[in-house]
Image: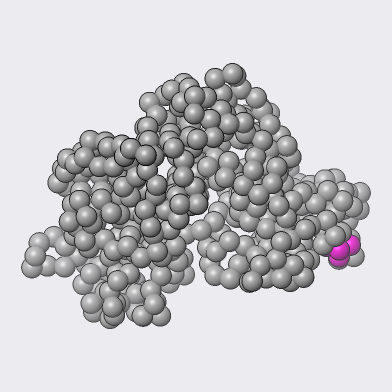
Amino acid sequence: MTTETHDIAVTVNGKVYKRTVEARLLLSDFVRHDLLLAGTHVGCEHGVCGACTILFDGVAVRSCLMFAAQADGHSLETVEGLAPDPEHLHPLQEAMRDCHGLQCGYCTPGILMTMKAFLEETPSPDEAQVREALSGNLCRCTGYQHIVDAVLLAAERALGSSK
Amino acid sequence: MKPAPFRYVAAQSVEQALALKAEHGDEARFLAGGQSLVPTMNFRLTQPAMLIDINPLTELAGLKNGAGDNVRIGALTRYRTLERDPTVADRLPLIAEALPHIAHPQIRNRGTIGGNLAHADPASEMPAIVLGLGGRLRAQSVRGERWIDASDFFIGALTTALAADEMLMELELPAAPPRSGSCFMEVSRRRGDFAMMGVACTVRLDADGRCAQARIALCNAGEGPVFAAQASESLVGGAIDAARIADAAKLVQGEIEPGGSIHASKEFQRHLAGVLIKRTLTTADQRARRDH
């Protein structure tokens, strides 16, 4: 079968990328292989593990369950776009470090992007809400407790600084 | 895991999408949320020659009022939208209660109700709920449109009454009437997993507190969503008390044909159905009384 290509323009972390992609190219592979933004990790490739979660027009989605061609004209955020500059971490990243919210780190980019969208919508969550919001991200190292602590700490600090 | 090659068309209009589907039939698939379709493509269990992406057709998304007290939901409405729409909590409480059980936040951000219903996974929550509520679904093709009752729509596992050239456009559900209560519960191994057994029930009481109508539907209890007609009928005319609930649970256990799996034998699934029937009916009855 002939492979079909599409010319797309996608904004990723504020920068516009123009590429020609195969119709069947997954959005996760596009971000990693075509844009060389390998911070987005690929775990199960069928929508179970959450490692590939990115923000699509501000909404957390599994990038392994979308095609690059679908992102034409849309705006993505990946983990590379989180930190404001090379010297500083995003408050969520800061809290993950302070709380030991990662060990091997494979699931971390997906968790950070999921939690970024979650905290924007739910700035003052309780532990149950955090656990529900985290339920689509598998972590085999931490047992989740320290990730939950980190998200609660990041929320607390954000609320504290806005007072 | 990479999908097999296919042709991708981002639909620019419903007319174009329907014309393409009429031309390519079963070789073409509509791409809505893609949360069920794309995993099967990644595994190459599904290898459509063409994907017709209907995500640009935003007119297919959203809620509106239907005839009488009905609610119409566009096929492209995402679970995320349903979770945040107060109309759903107010008028379709059964759906509101089931939504948190459907996969995970990221999946609900993308997945659509129409895609889920057209996919017709027997273990999925929404087909059982639409069947339990007695909803109907509108299909359209280049030949015209038709409404299909939920009881005729779900034919079997991953099989619906939609013809090869038809698209599911919207569904219409009756809003919860006065003096009614509903309840959805399921048992799954982990949060967001498919249910080993799930029960959706609604009851409506008359002015004396007797059951005027009951509807019980189950997911993962057969080849498709199952409407437990005998058990539902058995409750009408009397108070929904412990004895009647126990009888209804026994009837349901006889009406379903669960398939069994390595995680739950058929016997265990029947047991779960009995337990869930008791819990959901008791809760629905309490809610209906509060609604008096």
Task: Give how far across and how far down residue A64 sits, in percent.
Answer: 36, 54
Q: Residue at x 23, y 69 (%)?
A: A93
Q: Is residue B147 left or right of residue B111?
A: right
Q: Residue at x 40, y 64 (%)?
A: A44
Q: Main secondary structure of the magenta part?
A: helix
Front residue (pair B268, A98): B268
The answer to which image quadrant residue B53 occupies is top left
Q: Which residues are magenta?
A: B245-250
- The type of colouring in the image is one colour
Count of number-bearing discs: 0
Task: Give how far across and how far down residue B108 sits, in percent.
Answer: 47, 52
Task: Give how far across and how far down residue A34 sits, in percent.
Answer: 20, 51
Q: Residue at x 21, y 61 (%)?
A: A38
Q: Is residue B206 left or right of residue B38?
A: right
Q: Is residue B163 left or right of residue A83?
A: right
Q: Is residue B81 left or right of residue A52?
A: right
Q: Residue at x 45, y 66 (%)?
A: A135
Task: Give how far across and how far down residue B17 sits, in percent.
Answer: 45, 27
The answer to which image quadrant residue A74 occupies is top left
The C terminus of chain A sits in image quarter: bottom left
